Image: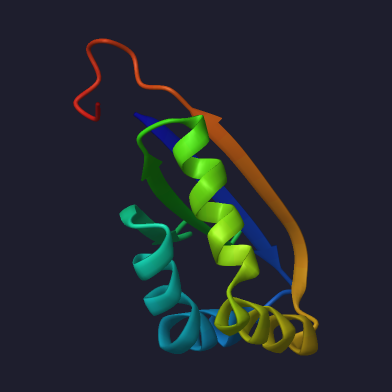
Amino acid sequence: MIYEIRTYTFKPLRAADWLALYREEGLPLQQELLGKLVGFFTTEIGDLSQIVHIWAYESLDDRLARRDRMAADSRWQVFGAKVKALDILVAMESRLMRPTDFSPLQ
C-alpha cells in the first residue's frame, strides 16, 4: 500500500472557501475516481491556512492510473477551473509514503 499525503496552503482566511467548494464538488469526484480516502484534516495549532488529506493506493501504478483518469475527467476539469477562479491557493505539496512493516496502516 502507498499513501499520498497532500498539503494545501491557502491565502489567510480563505481555506474555508476551498473546503466549501471541495465538499460539494471535489470530494464526490475524488471518492469515485481515487477511492480510498484515509483522512482529511484542518490545522488546529500551527499554520491555520493548511489542509491535509491522505489517500491510499495499492501501488504507484494504481495511483498513476487513478490520478490520470481523474485529470482526464471533464467534471474534475470544471472543478479545477472553479478552484483557479477563487485565486486562493498558495502552495501544494504531495508526499508518497510507504508504511513500515509494523504500521497499523498497511
Task: Locate residue 14: give its quadrant.
Answer: bottom right
Q: So how many labels did they put on this image? A: 0
Image colouring? rainbow
Residue placed most toward the observer, 61 or 14: 61
Quadrant where the image shows the N terminus = top left
Viewer-proximal residue among 10 and 104? 104
Pick whichever, 97 or 88, lies toward us. 97
Name the image quarter holding the C terminus.
top left
Residue extending farthest to the top is 101
Q: Quadrant of residue 58?
A: top left
Horizontal side, residue 50 vs residue 91: left or right? left
Q: Position of residue 68 (x, y in %)?
A: 60, 55
Q: Give the answer, above or below, for where 85 lies relative to 4.
A: below
Q: Which residue is drawn at 62% across and 81% down?
A: 74
- Classify residue 64 as left or right of residue 56: right
Q: Which residue is drawn at 73% across and 85% down?
A: 81
In the figure, 22 relative to 50: above or below?
below
In the image: residue 30, left or right of residue 51: left
Q: Which residue is drawn at 63% across and 59% down?
A: 8
The quadrant where residue 99 appears: top left
Up-down relation of residue 26 to residue 93 (above or below): below
Q: Is residue 57 above or below residue 104?
A: below
At 56% from the left and 43% from the top, the residue drawn is 64
26, 59: nearer the viewer: 59
Give the left or right position of residue 89, taking residue 69 as reference.
Answer: right
- Image coordinates of residue 31 in percent, x first then y, are 35, 67
**Residue 77 in picture, x, y percent from top left:** 67, 79
Q: Can residue 49 be seen in this view?
A: no
Q: Can residue 79 be seen in this view?
A: yes
